[in-house]
């Protein structure tokens, strides 16, 4: 294993071992939205939803809750359906825990650390 690969494995292992007490969660906002923080949020949401969604540039800068409404499913007969998906919207909540920005999927409580992102308490 190369030195670079060994270093990456060590960093991942140390990160995985760090546990954060959810009692220390504070609702948070992204304090300085940058290209890197927007990319981290976009990638995290896409990973959580197993889909590609479009986010506003100011997502999570004015509210600690992000609501995602899915489009109605396309069909062969109707590739561009009109109307709304009447299913429950998906919500994510941004929290600050110690100095980490954590995105929580409200469906199952899964937690994602947003790298390259600065947060402040809401």
Image (tube, grey):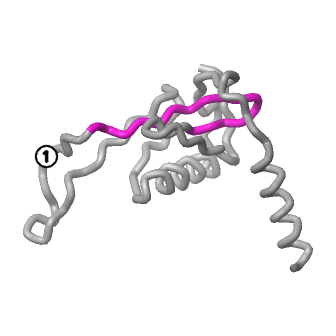
**Residue 106 magenta-drawn?**
no
- Give the left or right position of residue 77, taking residue 70 as reference: left
Counting from the top left corner in percent of width and height, residue 56 is at 43, 43
Q: Kindly state the secondary structure of the residue where label 1 is placed.
A: loop
- Give the left or right position of residue 101, taking residue 94 as reference: right
Q: Is residue 58 visible?
A: no
**Would you name the residue on which mark 1 appears?**
83
**Which image quarter is the C terminus in?**
top right
Segment tinted magenta in the rendering: 88-103
**Residue sitting at x 72%, y 36%:** 100
Q: Nearer the viewer, residue 66 or 17?
A: 17
Instruction: Determine the image quadrant of residue 114.
Output: top right
**Residue sitting at x 50%, y 56%:** 47
Q: Nearer the viewer, residue 95 or 19?
A: 19
Q: Is residue 12 above or below residue 64?
A: below
- Which secondary structure type mostly characterizes the magenta part of the structure? strand
Counting from the top left corner in percent of width and height, residue 30 is at 60, 33
């Amino acid at each position: 294993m190369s030195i670079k690969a060994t270093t990456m494995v060590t960093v991942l292992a140390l990160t995985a071992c760090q546990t954060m007490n959810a009692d220390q969660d504070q609702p948070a906002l992204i304090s300085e939205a940058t290209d890197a923080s927007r990319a981290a949020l976009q990638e995290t949401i896409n990973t959580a939803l197993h889909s590609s969604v479009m986010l506003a540039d100011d997502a999570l800068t004015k509210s600690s809750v992000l609501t995602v409404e899915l489009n109605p499913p396309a069909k062969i007969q109707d590739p561009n359906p009109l109307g709304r998906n009447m299913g429950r919207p998906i919500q994510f909540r941004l929290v600050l825990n110690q100095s980490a920005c954590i995105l929580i999927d409200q469906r199952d409580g899964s937690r994602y650390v947003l790298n390259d992102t600065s947060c402040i308490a809401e």
